[in-house]
């Protein structure tokens, strides 16, 4: 592992909207799936950087509930890439103390991939160096609806329902909210990502396409984060 340039303050939970795989490919005259392959590869590099910085949770947005609307070939290709990547990387991830988690709906994901995800989660559940939380078939609105549905099913007393209790019904029970959300590829929008948990996250956007987002870029984002003053609605003492 290399050494990273130090920053004054590091987020506990970093979340990344990994955008720009398609544009990265097009700019090289490649097919979109080549971009998804390069983007998926890049997770390893950034995960390693996060470990070096002592970040404890990395959430990556890999596939949204809206992404099902893309051409069939692209959707199926993304599923295949994830399946292969999981097969190839899992032993190494496990050896390195990575705990794998998934947020999103498992329903709708092809059975082979779903089975592998379950096995990976089971295998790595006691690892504690870093949590790699993969948002796949994830949508923030769907997450909130799923929570409301379960709250009603459980017959939760409306008088008891507060933000803490509600959070326990989301896909991220027990996980602290993201401190920093990075979006690559220049767009300035949330695209339905962690809309509840990100209420007080710091946001950082870079024009760099995700496959080109390297440790130097990570450093720049963390440096800017370390200079932000988080007020949470309060006034400075
Ligand atoms: C992000 O890259 C990956 C997914 C949304 C699955 P895109 O595929 O959105 O790449 P662009 O935005 O078209 O460049
Ligand atoms: C957001 O990127 C979803 C993921 C990175 C998985 P999109 O490319 O789907 O978002 P929009 O369409 O630009 O909002
Ligand atoms: Mg995109």
Image: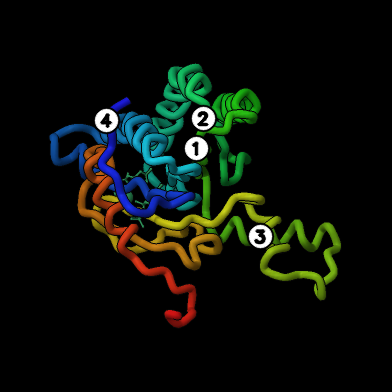
Question: Helix, strand or loop at disc 2?
Answer: strand
> Marks 4 and 1, Cα distance to the nearest angstrom?
23 Å
Question: Helix, strand or loop at disc 1?
Answer: strand
- Label 3 near label 1: C-beta < 8 Å? no
**Which-is-in-front pick, marks 2 and 4?**
2
On the image, the x and y values in percent for residue 156 come to 83, 64
According to the picture, the residue beneath numbered tag 2 turns out to be 98
According to the picture, the residue beneath numbered tag 3 turns out to be 167
**Would you say 131 lies left or right of 17 here?**
right
Earlier along the polypeptide chain: callout 2 or callout 1? 2
The structure residue drawn at horizontal position 39% and vertical position 50%, both measured from the top left corner, is: 10
Earlier along the polypeptide chain: callout 4 or callout 3? 4
> Marks 2 and 1, Cα distance to the nearest angstrom?
7 Å
Q: Quadrant of the N terminus?
A: top left
Q: Quadrant of the C terminus?
A: bottom left
Q: Is residue 129 above or below residue 15?
A: above
According to the picture, the residue beneath numbered tag 4 turns out to be 34
On the image, the x and y values in percent for residue 54 come to 43, 40
On the image, the x and y values in percent for residue 196 come to 55, 63
According to the picture, the residue beneath numbered tag 1 turns out to be 132
**Which-is-in-front pick, marks 4 and 3?**
3
Earlier along the polypeptide chain: callout 1 or callout 3? 1
Observer-nearest of 195 and 216: 216
The structure residue drawn at horizontal position 34% and vertical position 65%, both measured from the top left corner, is: 228
Earlier along the polypeptide chain: callout 2 or callout 3? 2
């Amino acid at each position: 592992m290399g050494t990273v340039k130090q920053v004054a303050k590091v987020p506990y939970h970093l979340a990344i909207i990994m955008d720009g795989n398609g544009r990265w490919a097009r700019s090289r005259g490649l097919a979109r799936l080549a971009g998804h392959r390069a983007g998926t590869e890049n997770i390893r590099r950034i995960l390693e950087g996060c470990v070096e910085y002592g970040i404890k949770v990395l959430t990556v947005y890999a596939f949204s509930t809206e992404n099902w609307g893309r051409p069939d070939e692209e959707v199926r290709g993304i599923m295949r890439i994830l399946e292969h990547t999981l097969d190839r990387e899992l032993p190494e991830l496990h050896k390195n103390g990575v705990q794998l988690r998934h947020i999103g709906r498992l329903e709708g994901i092809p059975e082979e991939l779903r089975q592998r995800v379950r096995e990976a989660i089971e295998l790595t559940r006691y690892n504690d160096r870093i949590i790699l939380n993969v948002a796949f078939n994830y949508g923030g609105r769907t997450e909130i609806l799923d929570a409301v549905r379960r709250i009603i099913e459980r017959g939760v007393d409306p008088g008891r329902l507060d933000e803490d209790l509600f959070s326990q019904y989301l896909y991220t029970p027990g996980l602290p909210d993201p401190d920093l959300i990075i979006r690559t590829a220049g767009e300035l929008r949330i695209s339905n990502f962690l809309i509840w948990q990100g209420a007080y996250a710091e946001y950082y956007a870079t024009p760099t396409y995700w496959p080109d987002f390297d440790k130097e870029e990570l450093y720049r984002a963390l440096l800017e984060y370390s200079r932000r003053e988080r007020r949470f609605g309060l006034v400075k003492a």
